[in-house]
Amino acid sequence: MTQTLDFLDGQAAIVEAAITSRLSARAFTSQPVPRPVLAHLLEVASRAPSGTNTQPWKVYVLQGVSRDALVAEVCTAHDALRADPALAEEFREEYDYYPAKWVSPYIDRRRENGWSLYGLLGIGKGDKDKMHAQHQRNFRFFDAPVGLMFTVDRVMGRGSFVDYGMFLQNLMVLARAHGLHTCPQAAWNGFSNIITRHLGAGVDEMLVCGMALGYADMSNPVNGLHTPRVPMDEFTKWLD
């Protein structure tokens, strides 16, 4: 029997609160996240819909020594890439997350987001060293105790990325419902050759993205960034 949910009893407000309080946290405390909690989040998140129930997601959970070893290796590679830009050919994303050519309004939103973040951190346009250090915070999972890596089978089509997005959103909203925060991270994608080797992933697997998960350090100014959203009427067309 299908369970009927009565959203008049406050459940809708709880769901909305989890969605609207979600943010991409960029500073975490060292408080550990119990494994049973992580397992529960992933189990429930797997109820995300997927085309013909293909369930294309595959998740690697990094904690402790394994997490720290990956952080060290990728940070070293990130520094090497800055010192020798020719290494860019070695560290290429396997799929285009961003467009090859930026146009408005997307480039405007991207710039606003970047300079809002740097403004909170006191990083000016010419502060190349500080920009590099802040970007490298991605590769430290922003100090979160849990790092997640997500892969997909190369045989799958573009639709699986739609399915994957719903799975990731489930996971992030569930994390909020349990008092946790997350930061989904495409920044890792350029280092997929290092990451998949570290994970022991098969050659048939492609990195989709990473994610930091833990308890946000809300005393850190960086977590005061709340990105704006365009009004609903700007992205909606009503056809009556």
Image (cartoon, helix red, strand yellow):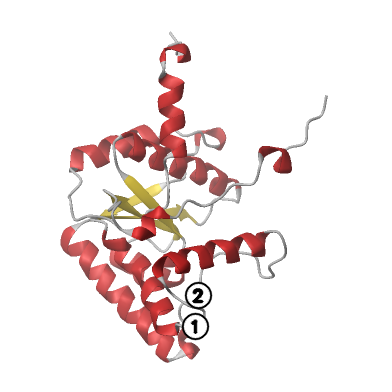
User: In the figure, residue 75 lies in which quadrant?
Assistant: bottom left
Give how far across and how far down residue 17 sits, in percent.
Answer: 42, 32
Rendering coords of residue 163 (x, y %): 53, 42
68 sits left or right of 104 in the view: left
Give the image location of residue 209, x and y in percent: 44, 58
Identify residue for label 2: 92
In screen coordinates, is 237 left or right of 7? right
* SS of the residue under disc 1: helix
Label 2 crowd bin: few (<14), some (14–19), many (20+), radius 10 Å: some
Q: Would you place residue 213 above or below residue 18 in this image?
A: below
Q: Quadrant of the C terminus?
A: top right
Query: x, y (%) of residue 160?
Result: 55, 46
Residue 127 or residue 4, whichever sits in front: 127
Q: Are marks 1 and 2 in contact (CB under 8 Å)?
A: yes
For the residues labelled 1 and 2, the Cα–Cα distance comes to 6 Å
Q: Nearer the viewer, residue 224 or 155?
A: 224
**Residue farthest along the top direction in this orientation:** 1
* Residue 208 in view of the camera: yes
Does 110 sit left or right of 63 as displayed? right
Residue at 54% across / 50% down in the picture? 156
Q: Is residue 26 visible?
A: no
Which residue in the protein does label 1 denote? Answer: 88
In which quadrant of the rendered image does the N terminus lie?
A: top left
Tell me the SS state at disc 2: loop
Q: Is residue 103 above or below residue 225?
A: below
Q: Residues within 10 Å of mark 1 (few under 14, many from 20)?
A: few
- Number of the label disc, if any, that sits on residue 134: none
